[in-house]
Amino acid sequence: MPRACLAILFSIVLLLPPSSHAFGLSSVKSWADGVGANLGNIYDNGTSDAFVSGYTWHDPGTYTAAKRAELNSHAWGLGWGKHIEDAHGNDQMVYAMVFSDSHWNAEPVIGYAKQWQWRPFDGDFKLGAGYTAAITSRADLAKNFPIPIALPLLSVGYRGLTLYSVLIPRFNGSPNNGNVAFLFLRYAY
């Protein structure tokens, strides 16, 4: 239970603009207003995105061959969202997606992502690293009750097409748990 509470708190804090991270209990309303204004700005002023997912990698060092044979690595799904670039070329997005999870069940997710971007060659090619904070629902976790997640996010993109990888870490030492990479594409239109 303490881990779940910590995950919820961490997810909420990650949704904030950096200037909102230092707040006292007396400023909860201004904190909530800041979160709402930031998300509203992305939605109102952002560029539309279409998402297609298609692959989930399960680490062979974590999962037995028998377990990997049972799992779905073809995580097909679709989504929609909006993103906005700040003055430094970094990216924020809001999104909703549904895809086939590792156990062949539909997994919906709605969330926010922030990425710091580097353009090593020119303005069209970019590399990104950041995080996503979202709400998802899984049949194998909490019986489809919505749960918060906060995960690292990496990307490589060229113009309007970006490949993302969400990294799901191993949570304990037991086999067949965690060390998963979920890949999806974003097309900005």
Image: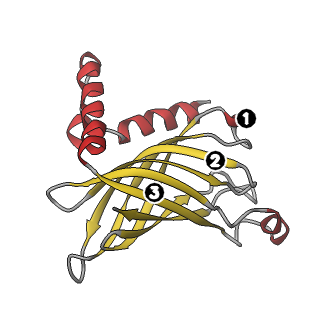
The residue at the point 30 percent across, 73 percent down is 159
Q: Mark 3 vs mark 2: which is more N-terminal?
A: 2
Looking at the image, do the residues carrying marks 3 and 2 touch, with CB atoms under 8 Å apart?
no
- Residue 136 visible in the snapshot: yes
The residue closer to the viewer here, 102 or 161, is 161
Residue 64, horizontal then vertical, whole percent: 80, 68
The residue at the point 30 percent across, 26 percent down is 32
Q: Amino acid at mark 3?
A: Pro
Drawn side of residue 60 relative to residue 184, left or right: right
The residue closer to the viewer here, 11 or 62, is 11
The residue closer to the viewer here, 159 or 133, is 159
Q: Which mark is residue 82?
A: none
Q: Which mark is residue 107?
A: 2
Residue at mark 1: 143
Snapshot quadrant of residue 63: bottom right
The residue at the point 33 percent across, 69 percent down is 160
The residue at the point 45 percent across, 44 percent down is 111
Q: Amino acid at mark 2?
A: Glu
Q: Secondary structure at mark 3?
A: strand
Residue 107, horizontal then vertical, whole percent: 63, 47
Q: Which mark is residue 152?
A: 3
Point out the image quarter for the C terminus: bottom left
Residue 178, horizontal then vertical, whole percent: 65, 57
Dot 1: within a 10 Å radius of its alpha carbon, few (fewer than 14), some, or many (20 or more) residues? few
Using the numbered discs, state the Cα–Cα distance from disc 3 to disc 2 in whole angstroms: 18 Å
Judge depth for marks 1 and 2 and give the one in front: 2
Q: Secondary structure at mark 1?
A: helix
Q: Amino acid at mark 1?
A: Lys
